[in-house]
Image (spheres, rainbow, N blue to C red):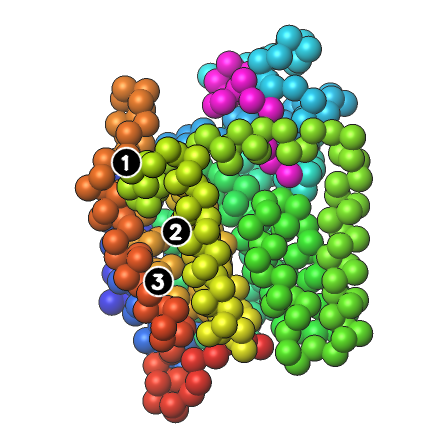
Amino acid sequence: MLVLLCISIVACCINVGPTSWYVLSAVWGLGLWYIRRQESHDLLRLSRYLLATFAVAIAVLFYQTDVFSDDAHRYRWDGWVAVHGVDPYSAAPVDSSLASLAHATDHVRYPDMINNNTLKTIYPPAAQLVFSAIVRICGTEPLAFKLGWVALCMGMIALTIWLLWSDLHLLSRYLGVLISPIILLHGFMDIHVDIMMALAVMLALAMLRKGGRMALVGSSIYGISIAMKYLPILLLPVVVKHHALEKRIAFQRALIIGSTIALLYIPFMHSDVFGSLGVFARAWQANSLLAWTGNHFVEPQLTRVVLMAIAGSVMLVVFVRWSGDMLWMSSLWVITLLVFSPVVHPWYLALSLILWVVAPSRATIVWATTMCVYAYTYENYKGNGVWYDHPVALAIEYVPVLVALGLDVTRGPLLLRDQHRMGLSPSVDR
């Protein structure tokens, strides 16, 4: 079973398209349930197989780019602009003030082929520093940039594996998440900053588990993850408000997190860091069943307000029910916010997937599996240039997720086989 799972995952990574994403999602979903049910004495062998599968899959996927997204064009452009001493937040790519920076590499014309090139960048300062560092070292040629990107991600993964090696339950779940279609296809084939952010969060959590000076470094890395994409801020209670923490330690962590974020934002303090983020928040919609449904009854702006109000109410219920288990509570906050968001691309699930390692939820497994129907919408978009969310596709993706989320809120996290046998509490807070 294990060997067949690993071979199937690698085979699906060869010449990726919609069909292979469908198959990979089904295989991975079944495989993750298999991983969760393994006995403790099988976990070392399982981890070695999963690590080998991940390494081979990364090698197979390396030469495939821009299959389901071309966001990497924007990353390379932002880095290119910064390397040339220009504030990446100063102007949209097609602005005449940046005309001298236009160039072409490997069939990619900058800035013509950047999506939404009439809008300023929306990526926070930590992401901008990553983009510029990789461009400075590797340039803007797609595969060279991707090599630098993958090297940075693999460095974080290697360090996280080392930190988790003493806990094979966590390690096997981490490796199981790494071979998910979300991480493989949208983090290592089509690169996305959300995956790098999620890897940084997991590294931070692994360091926080160790305590001492390692936890202080982990607090800084957590601050970097917030300044890379804002979603990890929902994990703040886990880092600084844990019930077992002394007030002095909690204060130290909060100070380090705040100082790290401040240091990353200071170089851009006079920049329009949030310039196009408001446009994104007000106007964009994609792959959201609840937003699609709401828009058939009220204006889109009101739909967004209603969805955020419902999301806030659900998150309050989660707080009341699960505040004693902050990892679980925060993981539910993350996936709840995504469920009620008017825009959900596959790579947005990266943080929920990473949190599955320490807070195994049903909704995460289900959504990372059903998200494959996004390939149908994207293929149509590539064919006719019109983004259309088909209601049947949205229903197939979202209805199982809503059911699973309801079970998560009422029942708590999934248990491992050993935990079922021993009658342990579902708490995974550490």
For label 3, the SS is helix
User: Badge 3 is on which residue?
Assistant: 405
Label ID, residue 339: 2
Separation (CA) of disc 2 from disc 1: 18 Å
Residue at image location 49% in from the left, 22% down from the top:
116
Dot 3 amino acid type: Leu
Mark 1 vs mark 3: give the one in front. 1
Q: CA distance from mark 1 to mark 3?
A: 24 Å
**Position of 393 relative to 253 (above/below):** above
Q: Quadrant of the C terminus?
A: bottom right
The magenta stretch is 108-124
Q: Quadrant of residue 239?
A: bottom right
On the question of residue 76 being in view, the answer is no
The foreground one among 66 and 382 is 382
Assess disc 2: are there few (<14), some (14-19) or many (≥20) residues with their C-alpha within 10 Å of its C-alpha.
Answer: many
Residue drawn at the location 60% of the way across and 19% of the way down: 92
Q: Which mark is residue 296?
A: 1
How many numbered circles are shown? 3
> Which one is earlier in the sequence, the residue at label 2 or at label 1?
1
Q: Is residue 272 left or right of residue 186?
A: right
Q: Position of residue 359 (x, y in %)?
A: 46, 69
Crowd band around label 3 with a 10 angstrom C-alpha radius: few (<14), some (14–19), many (20+): many
Q: Amino acid at mark 1?
A: His
- Mark 2, secondary structure of its residue: helix
Proximity of marks 2 and 3: CB atoms separated by less than 8 Å: yes
Q: Position of residue 396 (x, y in %)?
A: 22, 48
In primary-sequence order, the first of circles 1 and 3 is 1
The Cα–Cα distance between marks 2 and 3, rounded to whole angstroms, is: 9 Å
39 or 115: which is nearer to us? Answer: 115
